[in-house]
Image (cartoon, rainbow, N blue to C red):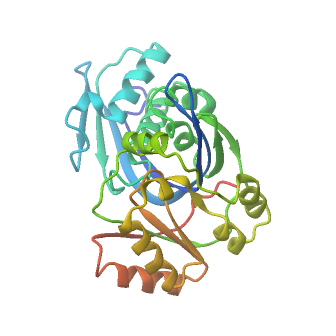
Amino acid sequence: MGLNEINEVQINAPAKINLYLDVLNRRDDGYHEVEMALQSVNLCDVVTIKKTDDCKIRLTCTCKVTNQTQDNAAYIAAKKFFLHTNIKNPGISINIKKRIPKGAGLGGGSTDAAATLIALDRLFNAGISKSQLAEIGGEIGADVPFCVYTGTMLATGTGTTLSSLPSIAKCWIIIVKPSVFVSTKSAYEMFDRCAEKHIKRGLFDFVHAIKSKNLRDVALNIYNRFEFVLNLEEVSKIKEMLKKSGALNSCMTGSGSAVYGIFNDEEKAQTCKKNLYEVYDQVFLTTPVNLN
C-alpha cells in the first residue's frame, strides 16, 4: 500500500425529516411529483467500508434490513459506484451500524446509500463531485441525492431536483417511532386512491417562514400530506403528546410512521424524551445538521 493510500473509510449517515411534504400528482411513468423541504438531523447510522482482496462486495449490518443483500441500498450504491467510475472492484466490505429505525420515513436506507457513495469516492480517491454522486444516487432512490448533500434543502420533481434553503434556526427535535409500519409504496397507492385532496398552507408560506429565520413560523408551517392520506391513530396520539410537552408543533415524516416535534427549549425536549420513553421504545433527541 502506498503512503497516501487508505484501505478503510468510516462515514456518519444522518437521518432526514420532512419539514414539508406534498404529493402533487402521479405521472404517466408511475412516479409522483412532490414538493418537499428536507432537513438532516444528527441521528446517524455509521457506514464503514474496507478494501478486501476477493473482488466481491460483502455487506454486514447490526440489524436485518432486507431479506437479500443485493436489495440493500448500500449494496446497490456500491455496484453503481463501480459501474459509473469504471474502477475495478478489488473487493470491499461494507458494515452498517444501524441507529435509524427502518420503516420510519427517516431515510435510513437512502442515507446509507449516500454514505456508501461518499466513502467509496474517498477510499478510491476517485475525485467525484457531490453533484455527480447525487446523480448516481438518483438511480438508487429519490431521497439519496439529498442525503449526499445533507443540510436543509427543497426537493421538487420526483424528489431529486434540489435547491438549497437557509438553515433552520437552533432547535431540538424529538423523534418518536411507534411500532406501526407503513411502506412507501402503499402510502403512494393510498394517495392515488384518495379522491378528496386536503387543503394545505402551501409551500410558499413554508419557504417564507424558513427564510425569515423565525422558528415559530417554521414550526407553524410544517406539513405532510401523508398524515391526512394515512390517518394513523398512533401518529395523532404522538403529535398531541409532543405538543402537550412543549413542542412548537409536530408532524409525521415521510410516509411514516415516525413523528417529530420541534422544541425551542432544550430542557423541555429532554423532559419530553424521558416521558415518551416510558411509552415508546424508540425515542430520539436530535438537533439539525446545518451546513450554512
> Camera-side residue: 57 or 209?
209
| Residue 73 visible in the snapshot | yes
The residue positioned farthest toward the front in the image shown:
195
Query: Is residue 89 rendered to the left or right of residue 226?
Result: left
**Residue 107: % across, % down:** 44, 48
What residue is rendered at 71% in x and 46% in y? 164
Residue 145, placed above or below residue 207: above
Q: Is residue 239 above or below residue 9?
A: below
Residue 153 location (% of width, % of height): 65, 48
Q: Position of residue 67 (x, y in %)?
A: 19, 36
Residue located at (51% from left, 86% from top): 268
Quadrant into which the N terminus falls: top left
Residue 288 in which image quadrant: bottom right
Using residue 44 as the reference point, say whether residue 262 is left or right of it: right
276 left or right of 18 in image: left
The relative height of residue 236 versus residue 252 in the rendered view (above or below) is: below
Q: Nearer the viewer, residue 229 or 151?
A: 229
In this view, 88 is above or below 112? above
| Residue 253 appears in the picture as rendered | no
Q: How many marks?
A: 0
Q: 32 or 273, which lies in front?
A: 32
Residue 120 placement: quadrant: top left
Q: Quadrant of the C terminus?
A: bottom right
Q: Residue at x 55, y 50 (%)?
A: 196
Q: Position of residue 143 (x, y in %)?
A: 51, 40
